[in-house]
Amino acid sequence: MSRRAARPAKLVGLMPVFMLLSAGVAAADAPRAVTHGQEISRGVVGPEVLGRMSGRNVEGAVIADGTVPRYAAVVSDAATYDGFAVPGPHVLIEDVTIDGALDISVAMPVVLRRVTMFAPQDLPWLVLVRPGAGALHVLWSDIGGAKIKRSASPHVGVALALRGDGARVYRTRIGAAADGVQIGGRDIQILESEIANLLARSGDHNDTIQMFDSAADIEIARCRIENRHAQTSAVTVLGRTVTLRSNLLAGGGWTLYGGAKRNGKGGEGARGVRVEDNIFSRAFSATSGSFGPVTYWDNAGGNVWVNNRFESGLPVVAP
């Protein structure tokens, strides 16, 4: 579903404010249905799939209470973008290519739609959502510019660092960093996206998706999640109430760290983890990860392991 049409209503300081009009759906915006992460390819994620390339080049910015970049709009009313309801007021950034990082602490929600982001130099992160920030929505975007072939890429520690709550990531490509997504917040969904093409320098420990102890109420579904490097993980689970469903997982040392004993660090491990209907790909190793498909899995604590398998259909049995 496309977003509702918007028109300028008034200005507050230097920030444009938009009122939302009647809903409309453009045929070009209707996405092809995805039922499993193995169907995810570069033909179904990112801004170009909608027939639009990210627009003008702009610089990275700090988005804080009272401070938004000139290329952002402040939308006064609630709106729906690609089926996701966003309360008003919220910050909307769309159809731009951002050269640099976004540091987000503003209390209102932020929507990135049809946005491409590159790192012009080495950076600790490309998008940082700080604790207490409003919910971030990343829709039909490319965080890292992983599709674009470049002779050399700056070193980025993590493409998308979710320290705040409520994030939604949909039909987005994330990569060109040491870690793809780090999750420390609550109530986070990553849906029908590609997180792959990690870059490694000496000393990196690559995780395509890494959760911290504070993560809770996490859903990752119908995604392609790959770590082409033979170390660390495709997904490292920690926290509470985590669902991994219908994803394609591949690569890393162990493809999945299940969170038991905090993945070997000691203490209470992850609880309420449901891993269901995932395919462990052998694209990078005959055992999915260079050491195997899964480690540190605990069948206690409300954790559930159901119908996970290799591409051949052979079951992947939790240790």
Image: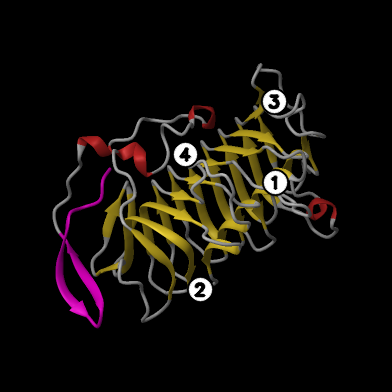
| C-alpha gap between disc 4 and disc 2 | 26 Å
Query: Mark 3 or mark 1: which comes first in sequence?
Result: 3
Query: Mark 2 or mark 1: which comes first in sequence?
Result: 2
Q: Which mark is residue 132?
A: 2
Contact? badges 3 and 4 (CB < 8 Å): no
| C-alpha gap between disc 3 and disc 1 | 29 Å
* Residue 34 screen position, x and y as percent: 43, 31
Nearer mark to the viewer, of 4 and 1: 4
| Above or below, comparing residue 55 to residue 16 in the picture | above
* Residue 210 screen position, x and y as percent: 66, 52
The amino acid beneath tag 3 is Arg
Q: Which mark is residue 192?
A: 4
Quadrant hosting residue 185: bottom right
Residue 18 among magenta residues = yes
| C-alpha gap between disc 4 and disc 1 | 26 Å
Which residues fall within the magenta stretch?
Answer: 1-20
| C-alpha gap between disc 2 and disc 1 | 29 Å
The amino acid beneath tag 2 is Gly
* Residue 276 screen position, x and y as percent: 62, 34
Query: Which residue has dot 1 on it?
Result: 302
Q: Residue at x 60, y 30 (%)?
A: 277
Query: Mark 4 or mark 1: which comes first in sequence?
Result: 4
Query: Which residue has dot 3 on it?
Result: 282
Work out whether residue 75 can be spotted: yes
Task: Tell which of 84 and 46 is nearer to you.
Answer: 46
Disc 2 element: loop
Query: Mark 4 or mark 2: which comes first in sequence?
Result: 2
